[in-house]
Amino acid sequence: MKILSPSMHAYVDYLIVLFLWTAPTTFIMPDDLGRIAYAMGLAHLFFTVCTDTNATIFRFFSMPLHGLIELFVSILIVTLCYTWLRYDDRSRAFLLTYAVILLVMFVVTDYTDSEAAKMVRRPKGSAPLTDPNTAA
C-alpha cells in the first residue's frame, strides 16, 4: 500500500523533525536522551533537505536511496534498543517509537513515483526529440 508521494513524504519528514526537536521538552527527557533526540532531528533534517523531491532545497540523494537509508536506520535503532540501551526504559520507548515511525514511512511511501520523471515523459507513440541542426 503505497499512499505517499515523495513530496508528501518530505513534508511528513519535516513533521518528524519537529517531533524530534520538541520531544525532549514535551516528554521531559533526561539530558543524554534529549541530546540524542536533537542530534537525530538535525541529521533527519539534513537528510530530508538533501533528498531529490519537490519539497526540498538540495538534490544529493535519490528517493529510493532515502528509503533504504530510513529502513537501515530503523533496523539499527531497534537493534540498539535491545542491546546497547536495554537498561533505560524511557530511552527504549522513545527510540522504538521513532523507529516504528520510520518503518511505517518506508512501507507507505511510493519511492518509484518521481516527479522529475513525470515531467520528462512523452506521450505514447511520440517520436524522440531531434535537433534540426544536426545531420541524421
Image: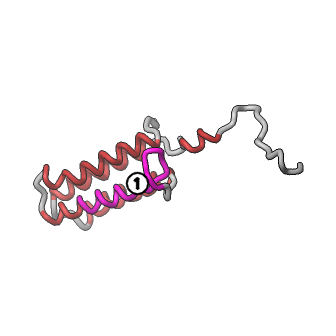
As displayed, is residue 55 above or below residue 87?
above
Query: Residue 54, image x and y in percent?
Result: 47, 44
**Residue 43 on image: x %, y %:** 34, 60
The quarter of the image holding the N terminus is top left
Q: Magenta span covers which residues?
A: 38-58
> Of 116 and 5, which appears nearest the observer?
116
Position in image of residue 115 (x %, y %): 54, 41
**In magenta segment, residue 122:** no
> Which quadrant would residue 35 be assigned to in this image?
bottom left
Residue lying furthest right in this view?
136
Helix, strand or loop at label 1? It is: helix
**Seen in the image, is 112 located left or right of residue 8?**
right
Which residue lies at the image location 77% right of the left edge and 41% below the top edge?
128
Q: Residue at x 57, y 44 (%)?
A: 116
Give the residue at mark 1. Answer: 49
Question: For the view shown, which residue lies furthest in the top direction?
Answer: 124
Exactly how many numbered labels are in the figure?
A: 1
Please tell me whether residue 121 is drawn above or below residue 87 in the rendered image.
Answer: above
Rendering quarter of residue 38: bottom left
Where does residue 110 sit, x and y in percent of width and height? Answer: 49, 41
> Is 124 situated left or right of 22 in this image?
right
Q: Nearer the viewer, residue 100 or 131?
A: 131
What color scheme is it? secondary structure
Which residue is at a point 37% across and 48% down the rendered structure image?
103
Q: Is residue 1 left or right of residue 83?
A: right
Q: Which residue is more in the foreground, 70 or 53?
A: 53
Q: Amino acid at mark 1?
A: Val
Q: Residues within 10 Å of mark 1 (few under 14, many from 20)?
A: many
